[in-house]
Structure formats: C-alpha cells, structure tokens
Image (cartoon, rainbow, N blue to C red):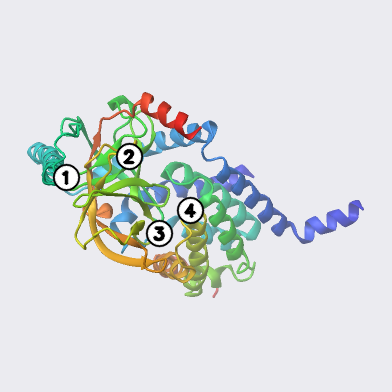
Amino acid sequence: MRKFLRRIVSDYKEYILLIFLSVISFTILAQNEKPAAKHLKTFALGNFAVINEITNSIVSIFKSDESRDELRNENAHLMLELNRLRKYRAENEELRSMIAFKDTSNYPLIPAKIISKLVTKSQGNFIVNRGSNNEIRKGMPVINSKGLVGLIMDVTENYSVVQNLYNSNLSIAVTLQRINVNGILNYDGKNLIIKDIPTTYDVQIGDIIETSDFSSIFPPSIPIGIVSKKESNVLGLLHNLKVEPFVNIFAANNLFILKIIPSKQINKLEMNLIK
Amino acid sequence: MIIHYLKPILFFIPLAVIQLVIVPLISISNIAPNIVFILIAYFTLKHGQVYGTILGFILGFLLDIISGGLTGAFMFSFTVSAFIVGYFYGENKIDINISTYFLLFILFVCGSINSFLYAVISNSNSNVSLFFMMLEEGILPGLYTALFGLPIVIFHPKEGI
C-alpha cells in the first residue's frame, strides 16, 4: 500500500501540487473579507506603497503646482454646486419646494494622488497617497473635478485603496436627474449599466446620472455620467441603460476624497429594516 | 530551498513596482501586459514545472496583497498558468525555449490563459459573454505580454543553440 502511494505521488506529484495549491488559492479567495486577511493586506499594501510612491514621483513629468491644485479644488467644489443647482431647478419645475434637501456643497475635500493602479477589466482599483493619518476612513467617496470616481475600500496609515467605477463589486444607487428615476449602477466587465428601468419612463440619451438620495454610501447629487445607450429586454417592458462616465477613470491622476463618515444611526436603522 | 526562491522574489519587487506604476501608463483600452508573469514563465522554463508552480503561487500571493486586488485571484491564475508553462520545460530545451522566438509563443499562450483565469475569478458579474472574455481579457493581454518577452529573446545569451 505504501509503495503504491509512493508511486502515485512520484508519478503525479506535479498534479497533486497543482490541486493542493489551487485549493489553498480558492480557500484564501473565500476568506477575503475575514479580518486576518484584511489586516495582512493593509500591512503589505502600506509598506509596499512607499516604493510605488517614490517611483511614481520619479515617473511624474510635471511637479505639482500649488496654484493648479487650488484651481482643481475650486473646480471640484463648483462642479458639486452646479449639479446641486441643476437638481434644484428640476425640483422647482415639479413644484417640490416643500421637500427638504440636504446641503451637499460643504463637504471637506481631501486631495489625493494616485500612486499605483491595478489594470484589469473587472477589478478597477487605485492606491492613493492618503490614509488614516489624513483622517481617511473606509467608505468615503472619491471624486475628481468631473464627477464620481469610486469609494475608499481599505485604509492604512498613509495609503488607501480606491475601488473605482470599473469594479464589478461596486454597486451604486443612482438617479436620472431629469426625470428623478432611481436605479442601481453596476459594472458588468464591459460597460457601466443600469438595469431594469421600466420603458414607461421617458429616458433619453444624454440624461445625466447622479448619486441617489437613497444611497447610504454616497451623498446625493454627485454626477456620475450620462446615458449613452438604451437596450430593451423582457418583451420591451424594461430596458438597460449604458452609462458613459464623466470621469476618464484610467487617465485620472489627482482625486479628492469627500470627508464624510457614514452615519452609524442610518446603518443601524437599515440593518433593523433588513432583519 | 527557500534560497532557491529568493532570487525570483528579489526580481519580483522592482517588476511589481513597474507593473503597478508604469504599466498602467502604457495600457491600451485597459489591456496591459503582465510583466510578473514573464518572470514566472522564465524561471519555470529554466527550473521545471514543480518549481514554476510553486513560484507562481508565491508571487501570485505577493502581487495580490500589494496591489489591493482580490487576494487569491493572481495566486490561482499564476499557479495554473505556470503549471502549463512547465509542460514546455525540458532539460535539453532550456536555451531553445528561452533564447528563441518560441518563448514569445509560450508567453502568448500561457499569458492568455493567465489573464483569462484572472478575469474569470475576479469578475463577479455573470453577464459578460465568454467570447468577449476570451478575446479582451485573455488573448489581447496575452499578446501584449508576449511582446514584452522580446527583450529576453534578443538579449539573452545564446549558449550552444
């Protein structure tokens, strides 16, 4: 029996090794959300990102100009303000001035620079040079002067991982600004898409998509993109909307992190509703 | 045994920096070469299938944890693709595999498999068609990766071919 097993192992050691390592890989894949795995990831990320930052600063051709940074900051504030005013106009036209509207224009913005990018089709992640030392917390939204970029997923002392719009794990509650219809925006590996919008709604190409009041992750009225295509499904009763983002995600370099901490009270209420 | 793996790990550190910082600058429509895979393929063709499989596992794990991506995705894709590269290994064929254009073919085939497996593992959305995945997330990155193997073919010393 022992001889037989020894022969099997020596004849098929490569396959046994492959299966063994594959099983370990899948096990680690399944443990991604466990605290120990996250801790290891943040430790490695935090230490390695220093090298990335040094290399990035060498590779960067243009040095950061203070006046340009100030202009970008002002531009980002103005972008948020403008979009908020567009929404006010739409609401006024529908005689909804009685609805309370939370002021979104006073969120503090923390500037950040991308120091490394993971370039894949489905796992869009950046690493930025701001971390818990800069009061960054997991769950803070990330924007640039044109619109929404993503969400802070992991934080170390000096660096953070940003999950951008082109990440299949990120789902965002959105609103079509003109007609105030809500939906969920996902990335399907190829396009940003809002699924299952009833065809009874008058959605037009070019309609602006922004974050919804119903989102507990993002504050409302952050512009995301425009409707670029409509595709009908389910006997023409529903359609899927393809969205073209305002931000060129892969050319993004300088970002702003909205210093918003998700409300624990709201999260608790939502958990109670789910239960 | 650990020392045997130290050399590629030392090579891995600057290559990982290049992969995460410089490669995004040369990506085309989000299609980028995988420089780390070239390292794994090179050492697999030099030292054998078992060595390469273990190396793919280790470097995949390291790349996963420093890139902020899904831990386990590169681990699996590098392990399997290094195993497949190992089929091309032969003690008498090391120079033929590494110093000739045959290396580009190996990098293309196995790089495509690597990219495809990574895409399958990391994409949680099931609406993407298989054909699209194979083309845009398998073959094209594999082709781009093979292109980056050209310097090895050109500059690697050709002994006794």
Q: Nearer the viewer, mark 2 or mark 1?
A: 2
Q: Mark 4 points at which residue?
A: B122
Q: Mark 3 points at which residue?
A: A189
Residue A265 is left or right of residue A229, and the answer is right
In front of the other: A145 or A17: A145
Asked if the residue at tag 3 contacts the one at tag 4, i.e. Cβ–Cβ closer than 8 Å, the answer is no
Q: Do labels 1 and 4 share a chain?
A: no
- At a point 15% along the width and 46% down the height, the residue shown is A94
Crowd rating for badge 4 (residues with CA inside 10 Å; few <14, some 14–19, many 20+) = many
Identify the mark nearer the N-term, 1 or 3.
Answer: 1
Asked if the residue at tag 3 contacts the one at tag 1, i.e. Cβ–Cβ closer than 8 Å, the answer is no
Measure how far apart labels 4 and 2 are at the Cα level.
25 Å
Q: Mark 2 points at which residue?
A: A215
Place residue A203 in its image quadrant. bottom left
Q: Given the image, on which type of amino acid does mark 4 rest? A: Ser
Give coordinates of residue A151: x percent, y percent: 33, 40
Q: Given the image, on which type of amino acid does mark 1 rest? A: Ser
Chain where mark 3 sits = A
Chain where mark 2 sits = A
Measure how far apart labels 1 and 3 are at the Cα level.
25 Å
Residue A68 is left or right of residue A24, and the answer is left
Name the mark on residue A145.
1
Chain where mark 1 sits = A
Disc 4, SS: helix
Disc 1, SS: loop
Q: Given the image, on which type of amino acid does mark 3 rest? A: Gly
Q: Given the image, on which type of amino acid does mark 2 rest? A: Ser
**Up/down of B103 relative to A118, above or below:** below
- At a point 78% along the width and 61% down the height, the residue shown is A11
Asked if the residue at tag 4 contacts the one at tag 1, i.e. Cβ–Cβ closer than 8 Å, the answer is no
